[in-house]
Image: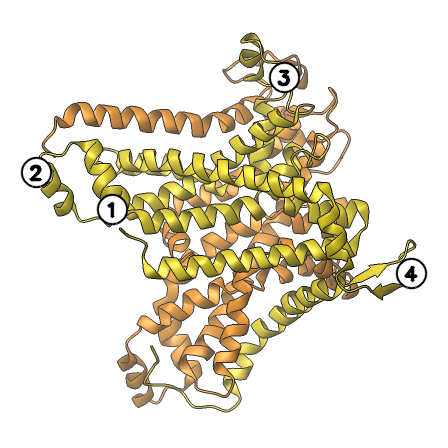
Chain colours: A yellow, B orange
Amino acid sequence: MEKRAIFSSRTLPYLLLLPQMAITIIFFYWPASQAIWQSFLMEDAFGMSSEFVGFENYRLLFEQPEYYRAMVTTIIFSSFVALFSLACSLLLATQADKNLRGGETYKTLLIWPYAVAPAIAGVLWIFMFHPTMGTLSRPIRVIGIDWNPMLNGTHAMILLILSATWKQISYNFLFFLAGLQAIPKSVIEAAAIDGSGPLRRFWTIIFPLLSPTTFFLIVVNIVYVFFDTFGIIDAVTGGGPAGQTTTLVYKVYADGRLGGDLGGSAAQSVILMIIVIALTAIQFRYVERKVQY
Amino acid sequence: MVENRRYRNIAAYLVLTIGIVIVAFPVYLAILASTFDVATIINGNMPLVPGPHAAENYYQTLFFGGATSREPVGIMMFNSMIMAMGIAVGKIVISILSAFAVVYFRFPLRMTAFWIIFITLMLPVEVRIYPTYKIVADLGLLDTYTGLILPLIASATGTLLFRQFFMTIPDELLEASKIDGAGAFRFFKDTLIPLSITTIAALFVIQFIYGWNQYLWPLLITTKSSMQTIVIGIKKLTYSQDALAEWNIAMTTAVLAMLPPVLVVVFMQRLFVKGLVETEK
């Protein structure tokens, strides 16, 4: 789609583009290309000089058991968060779609966690499940579980999944609700007249018609867990205990800052860039085509 | 539908209410904790109704901060406010200008420029943190508001949103203003901006929340405690991890950190929903 009526000017459009171009090139393309270049360099032990080492950083990375562990952690983390938050928000959205009295109020009361910073969400949840003083830790201990997310990797992961899910429900809820409201009521009424019950209507009509939304949300949720949960992890576990909750993004941060391994950190950044570009490409390709059965 | 509506509606209310309680509970606990002294919280028996220390907790947090960090949270909130406003306004200004250029002008390299901007959609700041950090350091922008703001406004969302919106504006409007003798600047100021007000407001709401909630970037580039934002300030309050951590101050800070963005979502819900849905398209 193009405009028919336009202005003609030789210099003005470039001036209008200048601010965004300057910022994009200085703070986006320049650092991104630095990351790629750095991933082929290795610094000596004192950080005085660096030499070109080809794919050495990548080779070393793929020899690290920690890297595979971070990969597995990321996959577990993102699958559970995507599954739980999509399931919860779909349930809530189908209920909120029923034209209830006070429906708008319910909506407001469900969407505000979107505004809570991930790091703050993490602090809220660690407070609630703190091993010694958490309000909900006591009931867990009473049923005989030695709950301690600060020492037990599984417990730490559960806590991360819960807080990340909590934070994401509102976002998914909004999109599911919009998706549900876009389904023509006549289709559902026709099925009801044909005698199919609410559950059957949901699985045979509503759920398939929602599939573009669901698919879009799956991709968005995975990207969310990859990147936006950095604050949650840093506030709740700091990647621990013993690196058991270190995700791929957290490892980029930890290796570059604490370990000072800039080449290795840059190589990880490049791999992450490839993953995000792939995810975005999938999203554009399939969301445009409208997944439906 | 044909089924008994009454029972289905009762079930719906029940599910929604349970959902709301679960969603609100962690925040309720934080608000509770901000009304007790630290001893009551740490012994693990915090009552589930508010205590008597709210006024002094908020007073101490805002004006004095924690005993160990000694940085008033009021200052952190001020920093967060500058950062969030800077990111929101900056993004809107640069993206509305570039969208105007891409939609209403024909010039060599127009599509190249569009793609250069478009690709930035794909890479969040997290994947290029260290090189960006180095550039900001080389430019002498560590511990400055400019350093906090500028790298985060390099993104395509705004430009795409405005481009999409400008495409829906009928060509006749531009033809009419041209006949009236308006140049590019007049058309932009008197026609385009007034028409875009809702889009601008929606983008502002989303970007304000995004800016206020930033974590990794301020964590890296602020070294002076007087430049900290509230979201990173809170971690220092909880991180001593021993029994002496001042959880009452930490949770008061958490409540204060949630307040501005949550108020924005609640009171500007319509704009928020519009912004969220449209920036993701």
Give the mark nearest the N terminus, 4 or 2.
4
Q: Nearer the viewer, mark 3 or mark 2?
A: 2
Give the mark nearest the N terminus, 1 or 4.
4
Give the mark nearest the N terminus, 4 or 3.
4
Are discs 3 and 2 located on one and the same chain? yes
Question: Horizontally, is A215 left or right of B111 in the view?
Answer: left
The amino acid sitting under disc 2 is Asp
The amino acid sitting under disc 4 is Met
Helix, strand or loop status at disc 3: loop
Instruction: State the residue position of label 3.
Output: A133
Image location of residue A139, percent across then percent down? 53, 12
The amino acid sitting under disc 3 is Met
Q: Nearer the viewer, mark 1 or mark 3?
A: 1
Residue drawn 37% across the image and 76% down it: B190
Residue drawn 44% across the image and 86% down it: B106
Instruction: State the residue position of label 1.
Output: A181
Q: Nearer the viewer, mark 1 or mark 4?
A: 4
Chain to which the residue tagged by mark 4 belongs:
A
Could you give the CA–CA distance between mark 1 and mark 3, rounded to whole angstroms?
43 Å
Mark drawn on residue A48 = 4
Are discs 4 and 2 located on one and the same chain? yes
User: Quadrant where the C terminus of chain B lies?
Assistant: bottom left
Q: Nearer the viewer, mark 4 or mark 3?
A: 4
Helix, strand or loop status at disc 1: helix
Q: Is residue B86 visible?
A: no
Instruction: State the residue position of label 2.
Output: A194
Chain to which the residue tagged by mark 1 belongs:
A
Classed neighbour count for the residue bearing mark 3: other residues with Cα under 10 Å, few (<14), some (14–19), many (≥20): many
Chain to which the residue tagged by mark 2 belongs:
A
